Every structure is written in structure tokens, then in C-alpha cells.
Amino acid sequence: MIKLVQFPWSPFCIVQRRILEFAGVRFKVVNIPNGDRSLVWRLTRQRYYQVPVLKEGKTVMFEMSDDSQVIAKYLDDRFKLGLFPRHWEGVQSILWRCIESEIEGPGFKLNDIYYREMVPASDRLRFIRHKERKFGRGCLEQWRAHQKELLQELASRLLPFEEMLIDKPFLLESRPRFVDFDLFGVLGNFLYSGHYELPRPHTQLKLWYQRMAAVKFASFDREKLHS
Ligand SMILES: N[C@@H](CCC(=O)N[C@@H](CS)C(=O)NCC(=O)O)C(=O)O
């Protein structure tokens, strides 16, 4: 059975989890502490320490760079989900870079502010150290102090996505493609703490988010998905 090694609030893990649910396949989630990557290190034969990692039999998948989509492409190919059709190539790459920087940036900071509610006490030292080594001393307090500005930044950066949804149910067309899952994961991370809602003016995005939370591959015509 497919195993997804993750922690539950990670944006990139939510993307893969939702793709697996969308595919309707059985899979097992293996949660690791944010601060202990020994399982990832072992599975990847000392080549990777981030999450997610996907394991199926002897195959172990993980990203090769910040912009690769190795796991999603593996699942897409494995279950013929039509998430990366040729006619959206290039456009999707530009969009996922934007989603994983412009939207993920304020989104993860806003969720991390509430780290005490999701990171067990035994892992908090490693969590804080990891964040401060990457973003500077006191970063979590700074993000808390700038919570309002971060929320405004997120809302304004989401406007183009709201606009994309005005006349269609998914970002690119009438069926979800990879970038829908990517944005869903990043917003799922932002919403994880339960302290936020999607920005109020973005009504289409709210409806899209509900659709994305429930959408199943089986409800789309297989041939049409690949067209
Ligand atoms: N581009 C990678 C990014 C993965 C990533 O940044 N994972 C984070 C968790 S959300 C992580 O493991 N960070 C720990 C670290 O970098 O040490 C992907 O799409 O999977």
C-alpha cells in the first residue's frame, strides 16, 4: 500500500494527501515529528530530509528541487489522473511557482504563529530552532506582531485566483488540474490552525475550496480528463 510520510499541517503534504484522496486509492499516512527526520533520512538513503515522501513497495519518491513536482507527477502517471495535460504545460509551472512562494509565504507564517496548538511540547524546541535558523531570531513573534499585514498581503495576492474562478469551477477549466491541488494544499496549511477563514471578499475562492475538499476523480469522465 502507498505510504505518505508527512506532518499534517505541511502545505506540500496536504497537496499529495488530497491527490491521493481524489484518486480514490487506499493509502496510509505516517506522521513524523517536524523535528525528527530520521525516517525520511532512512527511506531516502540519506538523500532527503523534507516532507512529503511517498513510498510504494520499493519505490520511494521525493522532490529533487524547490520547483519539481516529482510526487504529484508519479501519482498522476500511476493513476492516470490527467493533472498535467500537455496543453497546460508551462502555464501550470508558472502558477505553481507563484502559489508556492507568493501564497505559501504569508500563509505558512500565519499558521506557524499558532505552533503551540499543533506542535507537541516535546518537539517545540526543535520547531523554534528550525524556524529561527531559517528566518531569523524571533521570527515567530514578528509574524504574530504583523498578523494583520500578513492577512492583507495574503488577501491581495489571492485576488488573481479569485478572478480565475469567476466563470469556471476550477482554476484553469471545468475540471481540477495540478495547480488546483497545489493551491488547495497551501490554503489548507493557512487554515490549519482553525483561527482563520478565507478572505471575505473572495467568494468564488471559498466555493472552490469546498469543491476541492470533496472532489473525486471518479466523478469525471476519464476520457475528458485527458483531453
Ligand atoms: N518543494 C518541496 C518542499 C517541501 C518542504 O518544504 N517541506 C517542508 C515541510 S512543509 C519541510 O520538510 N521542511 C523542513 C526542512 O526544510 O528542513 C515539496 O514540494 O515537497
Image (cartoon, rainbow, N blue to C red):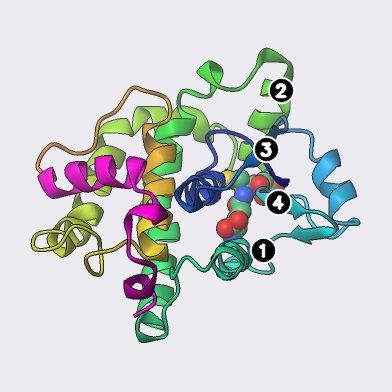
Distance between the Cα atoms at labels 2 and 3? 23 Å
CB atoms of marks 1 and 4 within 8 Å:
no
The front one of 31 and 115 is 31
Q: Earlier in the sequence, mark 2 or mark 4?
A: 4
Q: Earlier in the sequence, mark 2 or mark 1?
A: 1
Q: Secondary structure at mark 2?
A: helix
Q: Quadrant of residue 7?
A: top right
Q: Amino acid at mark 3?
A: Lys
Categorize mark 1 by other alpha carbons within 10 Å: few (<14), some (14-19), many (20+). Answer: some
Residue 42 x %, y %: 90, 48
Where 83 falls versus 53 (above or below)?
A: below
Q: Amino acid at mark 1?
A: Glu
Nearer the camera: disc 3 or disc 4: 3
Is 60 placed left or right of 184 in the picture? right
Q: Amino acid at mark 4?
A: Val
**Residue where numbered disc 1 is placed:** 63
Q: Quadrant of residue 84?
A: bottom left
The front one of 12 and 144 is 12
Disc 1 within 8 angstroms of ligand 1 (CB)? yes
Magenta portion: prevailing SS class = helix
Categorize mark 4 by other alpha carbons within 10 Å: few (<14), some (14-19), many (20+). Answer: many
**Residue where numbered disc 3 is placed:** 28
CB atoms of marks 2 and 4 within 8 Å:
no
Nearer the camera: disc 3 or disc 1: 3
**Residue where numbered disc 4 is placed:** 53
Q: Earlier in the sequence, mark 2 or mark 3?
A: 3
Residue 74 x %, y %: 62, 67
Q: Which mark is residue 123?
A: 2
